[in-house]
Amino acid sequence: MTRIFFQTPAGDLAPDNGAVFSMTAGGERRPPWLKVRPTFGPNYMRVKNILKTHGLHSVCQEAACPNIRECFENGTATFLILGKVCTRMCRFCDVISGPPGPLDPEEPAQLARAVAELRLKQVVITSVTRDDLSDGGASVFARTIDLLRQQDKEVKIEVLIPDMRGKQELVETVLAARPEVFAHNVETVGRLYKRVRPGAKLVRSLEVLSMADKYTPRPIVKTGFMVGHGETLPEIIELMNQIYQTGTQIVTVGQYLRPSEAHLPVEKYYHPDEFRQIAEIGAGIGFAHVEAGPLVRSSYKAFDQSKELLLHG
């Protein structure tokens, strides 16, 4: 049975009246269902300070995730490894792009210490893309997983990796470390790749997901994409079918939010009812879990997405 999770963000939902939200000089007017109630509780500051103490980065901070306050307050964070400067220049992403610095050899150990201090039993690890490295950072993913396992054999680990230039041996370096969940995001429909993800290819991302599906022992395989770049519903359905053919079990779908005026504009704000429709379409295709909603992100409540599969396979 497919599990559908439909996320309704905090805040009042507007009536479905087809209202159009125009651009303003200072950015974009967002519809009321995208309002988030900020919370800055003690745990939020605790998580933030622990990350700072260990010299670590989180994608929550670097990518300006709208769920950061909720996740930090709940004592969770998605760790960003391989530094914080990306060699790609995706036009939707708020992570810094440019020539990255050298790797920090202590980063995996620092991350393991932070996980222990945060008393986490579930860890999500992602990274910037490092096309400058011969192995794309695959060995650092593997080393980080290994140190976490040495520290706690029961810890559950999800990795969200870049495309590793589609090289199977690099993808398998990460898979050999045996994360419970292996994720790689396709991000958008094929027609929009050159505009949204220059330097990436949909076929390459689909191949990475297929590699994970065919690997033994097989992890839970997951991907995610955004809407709001100008895609059509038939293109969304086509993408979901392409993803399903790779053997991927979990799909997340969220609204693209423009980080700044230097990034691509939002072509459309999807109403919560439209996310519900997308989730139902995914269920009909056959995914084990579809998570869709305006503020859904790949790592948001990640282990809630995979817990049934982790329990029952």
Image (cartoon, helix red, strand yellow):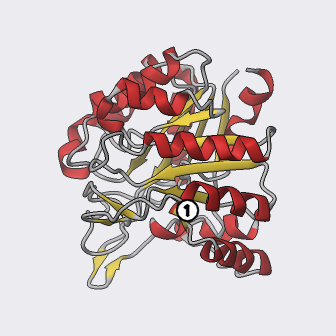
Q: Residue at x 55, y 60 (%)?
A: 106
Q: Estimate how packed mark 1 is, as few (under 14), some (14 to 19) or many (20 or more) residues with alpha carbons within 10 Å.
A: few
Depth check: 209 or 266 in front? 209
Residue at image position (53%, 71%) is: 32
Residue 185 place in picture, x, y as percent: 43, 41
- Does residue 295 appear in the picture of this structure? no
Residue 206 visible in the snapshot: yes
Residue 258: image quadrant is bottom left
Classify residue 137 as left or right of residue 222: left
Residue 129 picture location, percent across and down? 35, 50
* Pick the front one: 272 or 141: 141
What is the residue that sits farthest to the bottom in this orientation?
26
20 and 188: which is toward the camera:
188
Position of residue 304 in the picture relative to residue 51 (left or right)? right
In percent of width and height, residue 214 lies at 50, 14
Q: Is residue 232 above or below residue 294?
A: above
> In x, y percent, where is residue 217?
62, 17
Q: Which image quadrant: the C terminus?
A: top right
Q: Is residue 114 left or right of residue 177?
A: right
Q: Residue furthest left?
A: 194
Quadrant into which the N terminus falls? top right
| Residue type (three-letter) at the residue carrying disc 1 | Pro
Residue at the disc numbered 1? 15
Query: For the view shown, which residue lies furthest in the front direction?
Result: 105
Tag 1, which secondary structure?
loop
